[in-house]
Image: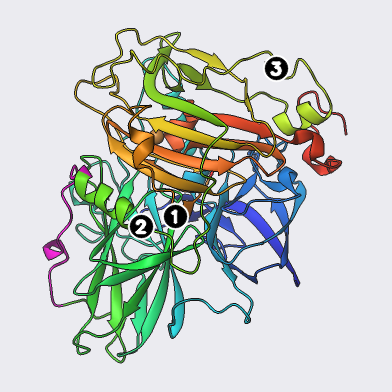
Amino acid sequence: GKIRRFKWEVKYEFKSPDCFEKLVITVNGKFPGPTIKANQGDTIIVELKNSFLTENVAVHWHGIRQIRTPWFDGVEGVTQCPILPGEVFIYQFVVDRPGTYMYHSHYGMQRESGLTGMIRVSPPVTEPEPFTYDYDRNVFLTDWYHESMAEKATGLASIPFKWVGEPESLLIQGRGIFNCSNDLSTTQNIVPGVCNATNADCSRFVLTVIPGKTYRLRIGSLTSLSALSFQIEGHNLTVVEADGHYVEPFIVKNLFIYSGETYSVLLKADQNPSRNYWITTSIVSRPANTSQGTAVLNYYPNHPRRLPPTLESSILRPIWNDTRRRLAQSLAIKARGGFIHAPPKNSDKVIVLLNTQNEVNGYRRWSVNNVSYHHPKTPYLIALKQNLTDAFDWSFTPPENYDSLNYNISQVPPNANATTSDGIYRLRFGSTVDVILQNANTMNRDNSETHPWHLHGHDFWVLGYGVGKFNESEDPKRYNLINPIMKNTVAVQPFGWTALRFRADNPGVWSFHCHIESHFFMGMGIVFESGVDRVSNLPSSIMGCGQTKR
Ligand code: C2O
Ligand code: CU
């Protein structure tokens, strides 16, 4: 492969992605950051300069497995020390598989401030993709808050607890229009309903298409909180790729996409070419009143600024709590014939992870098997390699099946108290592991949320989904062992469970967590170690914090 070098400078700038001015993290002046384009087998070198005045940073390459480079996974506290203001850090890794991936900050809740972007890896010419298209375009989705990360994080970590709330707007390719007409707190109301309308940033994203052509849209979501429905007025979308794996094509009108997921869809510009169409995103799985995100599908040669003749409010958005419809899409995703990589028939270990909302010393937290995660000052990977036995709780034995038989998932936890730990799950290298993610009622009556779980360093097979409580003797009989899709992020629906299988065959220390930024911040994650003895000498650039020795 080729070597591709990038020089990135990361800093805060005043910008107005949704017409409202606030601090935004930019990469080389851009938000979202530049797309990394490469071919399978290429080596990516990113020389990252932290130009924040007062904040640390670390960048994760979401979906890239970091085979033989576990120290460049970019997770502060797990695989590296944070990069300090003024410092330069060099990430170097191989993109080993074609597909659509993303990158984002993995430091505190910094992702929501904008350090995000996409990675596009093409297959070698000798291995053509099983579908054709004329043009390849990114459609990168996020939600957007006006409060700063410091305000959000402080609220979550306070007594009384202050929830982050729903986002102010939804962005498509980093652009949106904040509906400030009901927001009396804003002082930027120059044109009624449009804040800061004179700002050059304030415009919708326009996707121009040539009539008759087919477009591959690489849709990625790095929302901080929201699950989204994505739709293009009057057009069908054919799903062909998910998280870097080809799927058996299926057609949707609304694509449901959770934070941390990517999809490629084919869009044929086959509608009346004399007008433009709305592209919209809307929030599902939470009763949010955030306005939908809008962009314009522009049929060439219509003027790109010409708005569609229809009202944007006429675009049908799915009912927010129609879980069954969302589950149906998840169930429709199968590995593509000819590209099936079947899972091992059996696993060596089954870990049931019960997701609950709890309290720890009066602080509101999320827990996994009654343990709320926090990471130590010394990153695990370094602690394990340098044998720093008091850097974290080495003696911790993770509860792999916390009271799963007796726990009532449909009621508010009778005893909300959980514990907190920085202990990890150690897996035998090469073993096959099943993980059952079991959802439950939150601290509020008749309420359960959707959690997209993301695994670092591996892809997993999605064996099945279910509503209610997982039944250890019956449900595994219905697993799809024939053509399950492989992914790196998967949703767990309210009051439901999701079963996945992976091979612990990538030496390193890997984070596994809910991709909702505030949930992870509140402890919704665990860490897997396997084969750390096979990891070669760590680069000294990842050290310098906690007990690490350079
Ligand atoms: Cu995209 Cu650990 O995250
Ligand atoms: Cu979550």
Q: Which residue is mark 1?
A: 485
The amino acid on which the numbered mark 2 sits, given as a three-letter code, is Ile
Position of the N terminus, as image quadrant, is bottom right
In this rendering, position of residue 443 left or right of residue 392: left
- Badge 1: how crowded within 10 Å, few (<14), some, or many (20+)? many
Magenta stretch encompasses residue 494 = no
What's drawn in magenta, residue-wise? 309-323
Q: Is residue 465 visible?
A: yes
Q: Residue at x 27, y 47 (%)?
A: 327
Residue 456, image x and y in percent? 58, 43
Position of 41 relative to 351 (above/below): below
State if disc 1 and disc 2 touch (CB < 8 Å): yes
Q: Is residue 152 visible?
A: no
Looking at the rendered image, the disc whose residue lies closer to the viewer, 3 or 1, is: 1
Label drawn at residue 394: 3
Foreground of the two, 102 or 173: 102
Identify the element where label 1 is drawn: loop
Give the image quadrant in which the ligand numbered 1 is located: top right
Q: Which residue is mark 2?
A: 333
Earlier sequence position, callout 3 versus callout 1: 3
The amino acid on which the numbered mark 1 sits, given as a three-letter code, is Ile
State if disc 3 and disc 2 touch (CB < 8 Å): no
For marks 3 and 1, give the CA distance: 35 Å
Identify the element where label 3 is drawn: loop
Foreground of the two, 234 or 225: 234
The amino acid on which the numbered mark 3 sits, given as a three-letter code, is Trp
Earlier sequence position, callout 2 versus callout 1: 2
